[in-house]
Structures are given as structure tokens and as C-alpha cells.
Amino acid sequence: MLERRLRAAARGDERHLPERMCKAVGEALPVEAVSMTLFTHLPEAQLLCASHDLAVRLAELQFETGQGPSVAASATGQPAIWGDVSEVRAAWPVFGSLVREQLPRIGALYAIPLLVGRACLGSLDLARGTPMDPGARLRGEMLRGARAAAEILNAVLSTAPWPHWQPAEIIDTHWNSAHRASGKLAELGGVPPSLALDWMRARAFASGRPLPELADEILRSTRPDPP
């Protein structure tokens, strides 16, 4: 069912393709929040779509901490299933703590890699309000849907120029500003952008400030502290 809905969503204006795909996933699966992100485990990660504010915040937290099921799924090419977020996961200590503190409505998180062959484009990220370990049938539906989504996205991304996808304002505020700020710090400090981004994440967490706020400060400063 999910794969068929996604194929139907692929028809129409490419500018709103990810939004239609997120909607299709939310209608087909027993989840309350849906998002898709490109290159989730890399500094170049970019949100493609989010069903609502809860999905956006989950994507933000994983980008800001560099941890979580979406990051793991994108990095390994394997599904990351967290059937009960009240259970501590040693691999995601910071992310897990923040989810339980800031998003108590979340009961379970599922992240499915967007695979085209052996290449991973990113992740399909799902959340539900009550804990649940998906059975084999639901997992299969998620995997087939994610592969269909990846094929659709890859066909569009293979063309140039890339389409201008929504949510543009959210992407600019939470992702692009961090990329620009880490690039600025990398140039000043003579370090790789990935190291500069890790430094920004650590500083934002230590100070209790949102990563976009720190990135904006770095971009506005004429003499930011290098990492």
C-alpha cells in the first residue's frame, strides 16, 4: 500500500514532491510524524520534508547532536528501530535525553535508510506517540516504501539543477546557516568543515543554546572564535 501511494505521489509538480511523499507515508503507516532527510549522517544533511513541527524538531535534534536513529540508519544503510524511547540507548545518550525531556509525546522512533542499490541517500524518519516494536510485516512495508521513495528522489536529483524544495525557510534557518557557519570556522581555523560542525554542536550543547542561534552569531561576527 505504501509503495503504491508513493508512486502516485510522484506524479505532479516536482517542487512539492517531498511534501506529497511525507503525506503519503503518514497516511499509510501507523505513525504521527514523518520526515525525510538527505545525507542524514553527514555535515551536508538537508531536510527535505516534515509532516509538522514535531517532525521538524526531531530532525533538528538529530542534526544538532549528530546522534539518533536517523543518523544511524543513514550511516549504516540498516533500519534503526527504537520501539520505546523510554529505554536508554547507549549509542545516543545526548539525543535520547533531549527527546525524553523536550518531546515527551514521542513513544517510538523508526528510521529507514533511503537506499538506491547499495548507496544511501539519507533516511525516512517516523515517530509515533505510543511505544511499539513493528512486526515483520510492518517492517517490510517500511523497507519497501523507503526503497520506492529513494528511487523517486534519485530520479529527480539526477537532473540538474536541483529542484527548490520546501520547507525552504526551515532548511535555511536550521541547516544552511549551520553549513555556512561551519565553513566560515573551518576556513578561519584551518580545519575540515566536519570538525568545525562538531565543535559548534559541542559548544551549543554546553551553553544550552540552539545550534541555529550559535550559527547566526558566528555568521554575523567579524572575528568568531575558531575551533
Image (cartoon, rainbow, N blue to C red):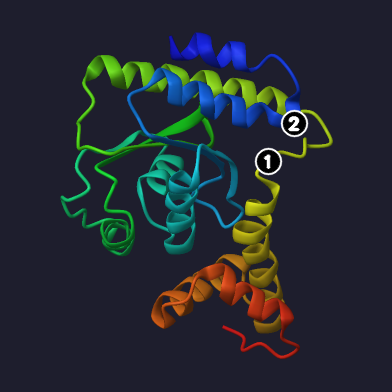
At x 55% / y 23%, what residue is drawn? Answer: 149
Sequence-first disc among 1 and 2: 2
Inter-mark Cα distance, 1 to 2: 7 Å
Disc on res. 166: 1
Horizontal relation, residue 153 to residue 161: left or right: left
Instruction: Please say if 96 is above or below 75.
Output: below
| Amino acid type assigned to the residue bearing label 2 in the image | Arg
- Do the residues bearing badges 1 and 2 touch, measured as CB atoms within 8 Å? yes
Judge by depth and name the residue closer to the eye, 94 or 19.
19
**SS label for mark 2:** helix
**Residue 61: image location, x then y, percent:** 43, 58
Relative vertical location of residue 97 with respect to residue 181 in this rendering, above or below: above
The disc at residue 18 is none
- State the residue at coordinates (73%, 81%): 220
Label 1 is placed on what type of residue?
Answer: Gln
Q: Position of residue 49 (x, y in %)?
A: 58, 38
Say left or right for 94 vs 210. left
Q: How many marks?
A: 2
Residue 97 position in % (x across, y down): 26, 62
Relative to 178, say whether 127 is above or below: above
Label of residue 15 in the image: 2
Which quadrant of the rendered structure holds the C terminus?
A: bottom right
The structure residue drawn at horizontal position 74% and vertical position 26%, both measured from the top left corner, is 14
**Residue 122 x/y as whole percent:** 52, 39
Q: Nearer the viewer, residue 39 or 37?
A: 37
